[in-house]
Image: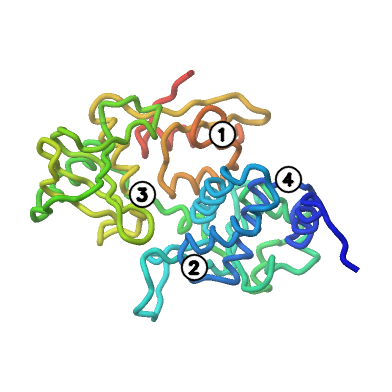
Amino acid sequence: MITQVSAKEVLTASRNQLGIPPSSAIDDTLLAAMLRRAAGVHCPCSLSTLTAAVTESLAYLTDCSGELEERVNAVAEGLIVIGDLLELNQVTVDDPNAKGTWVFSAPPGFIVRPSGSIFLVGIVPDEATPLPASLSGRVEFDTLARVLMPAQREDLPSVLRELGLREISATAWLKAPKVETAAQLRQDMVRRLSEQPPSGAIADLSILLADSPVNYYSRRWAPPEHHTGEFLARRPQAYGGALWGFAHLENGSVIRFLDFPLKSTRWRGCDVAWHLQMAIDQSRGTPQKYRRRSGTGGAYLDFFSPIPLWAQRRLCVVGRFVPPEHCLLSYWVPERELAAEEDYVQRHLWLTATGN
């Protein structure tokens, strides 16, 4: 006998199978769990393959299918940030055919937070979790993140190590570029750009206008038109997302182009680019901004432009992701860590606080 089931019933059963809190909603927690599950099956593969597998499986379970792809892509990016997914420059592979657009499943591991809670990372093939039932039932799902709270007098790190999870030191996981001034970073990149050979014409180039409002990131991108100077830029490629770089233009024509990521760095192209733009904005006297909002037990830090992976990871470890409110990214940070984190984003990212 065939039984008809509703979309809500399918979603409820899916969440139960994935071991996440019961609901019939397609929220970021569900999308993250589905992406991890898909990665255990498909990786290594392109990020588009991974996101398509999840998007297609949910296409007939929502009335908002037009927004679904964008949401899945955003959550996939979040899984790269928190370390569940790794890009090619973060792994060592023997396959000469490995493509720069591929993502890989990170092996199961954990980071001990300053509070003593455990931040879980990594994926196992064909399983929703590497943990036994006694521990998986204790996992707290904080949007994209998975957290384990130790019981009283419990040595949870030792338990996890015995299960085969690798402990990742907070120092290694939160490694960031060396501290330098915005002017130093900008000058170094301008020097590197000047050493590049003539690039020739680049079709469909987009540049980020430094003299545009810093609080409206998407509106800062524009075609080269008749602009002259050095600009953060993106150029399309046949397969995969657009490539990041730094371009010198004269009257709208590309003279030189410096590709990101740099060969001498471990950071993603987008991270190098976003960091550089922060330096450019600070050097121009129009630094990018963040907003602090009061919250229970701490405060929310809101960002209006993307911030590099290493800064996002830091905020995930000391605090947690929260849905953004009239901004691009938001994190809740506990009161005891707030002063240190605000100092961090001001010194490392050259951001200034705004009350707006």
The residue that disc 3 covers is 270
Upstream in the sequence, badge 1 or badge 3? Answer: 3
For mark 3, does the 10 Å Cα neighbourhood hold few (<14), some (14 to 19), or many (20 or more) residues? some
Q: Kindly report the distance in space between the C-alpha atoms of the residues bearing marks 1 and 4.
A: 18 Å
Tags 2 and 3 touching, CB below 8 Å: no
| Disc 3 to disc 4, C-alpha distance | 31 Å
Give the residue at mark 2.
104
**Element on which disc 4 rests:** loop
The amino acid pointed to by label 3 is: Cys
Instruction: Of the two numbered discs 2 and 3 on the same chain, state the one appearing first in sequence.
Output: 2
What percent of the width, then of the height, locates residue 302? Answer: 51, 31
| Mark in front: 2 vs 4 | 4
- The residue where tag 1 is placed is 324
Depicted 269 relative to depicted 45: above or below: above
Amino acid found under the numbered disc labelled 2: Phe
Give the mark nearer the N terminus: 3 vs 4.
4
Mark 2 lies on a secondary structure that is strand
Residue at image x 68%, y 53%? 60
Do the numbered discs 1 and 3 sit on residues whose CB atoms are within 8 Å?
no
Mark 4: few, some, or many residues within 10 Å (few <14, many ≥20)?
some
- Mark nearer the N terminus (1 vs 4): 4
Sequence order check, earlier mark of 1 and 2:
2
Within-10-Å neighbours for mark 2: few <14, some 14–19, many 20+: many
Residue 292 percent coordinates (x, y): 52, 26
Which is closer to the viewer, label 3 or label 4? 4
Mark 2 or mark 4: whose residue is earlier in sequence:
4
